[in-house]
Amino acid sequence: MSETTVKAPAPGISADTLFQMGLRLSTGGQEGVEADPVAALALFDMAARFGSIEAKIYRHELSEEMDPDDILEARRLVREWLGSVEPVQR
């Protein structure tokens, strides 16, 4: 199982920003960012919950490639993070 060092997103963050963060972490290699599929899946899930259609697609595609334990860890992160993040109203 992978471990993530990504911290909870800031309160008031937008679905689009969550999606962009997930993209960076899903691939890594940009601006010295290492790939972190667990955190990427968690960010895609939050972005999808906050209304991002693109995030729903990426969440599904990424989860198809992941170990079930890593998916469970991403879900745990989402539950933890949802307590501290409120979506920006569109």
Image (cartoon, rainbow, N blue to C red):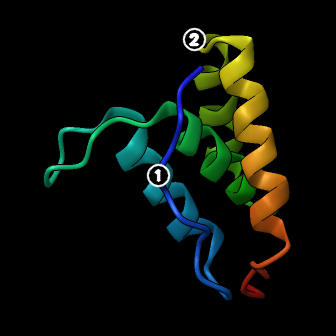
The quadrant of the picture occupied by the C terminus is bottom right
Residue 5: numbered disc:
1
The quadrant of the picture occupied by the N terminus is top right
Residue 69 x, y percent position in the rendering: 73, 18
Number of marks present in the image shown: 2
Q: Is residue 59 above or below residue 4?
A: above
Q: Is residue 35 above or below residue 84?
A: above
Helix, strand or loop under label 1: loop
Q: Write down the residue under mark 2.
A: 65
Helix, strand or loop under label 2: loop
Query: Badge 1: how crowded within 10 Å, few (<14), some, or many (20+)?
Result: few
Q: Residue at x 54, y 56 (%)?
A: 19
Report the front residue among 14 and 72. Answer: 72
Residue 47 x, y percent position in the rendering: 68, 58
Q: Quadrant of residue 86?
A: bottom right
Residue 9 x, y percent position in the rendering: 59, 72
Question: Marks 1 and 2: which is nearer the front?
Answer: 1
Q: Residue at x 64, y 68 (%)?
A: 15
- Please tell me which of labels 1 and 2 falls first in the chain: 1
Q: Residue at x 62, y 38 (%)?
A: 41
Report the front residue among 30 and 67. Answer: 67
What kind of residue is marked 1? Thr
What kind of residue is marked 2? Glu
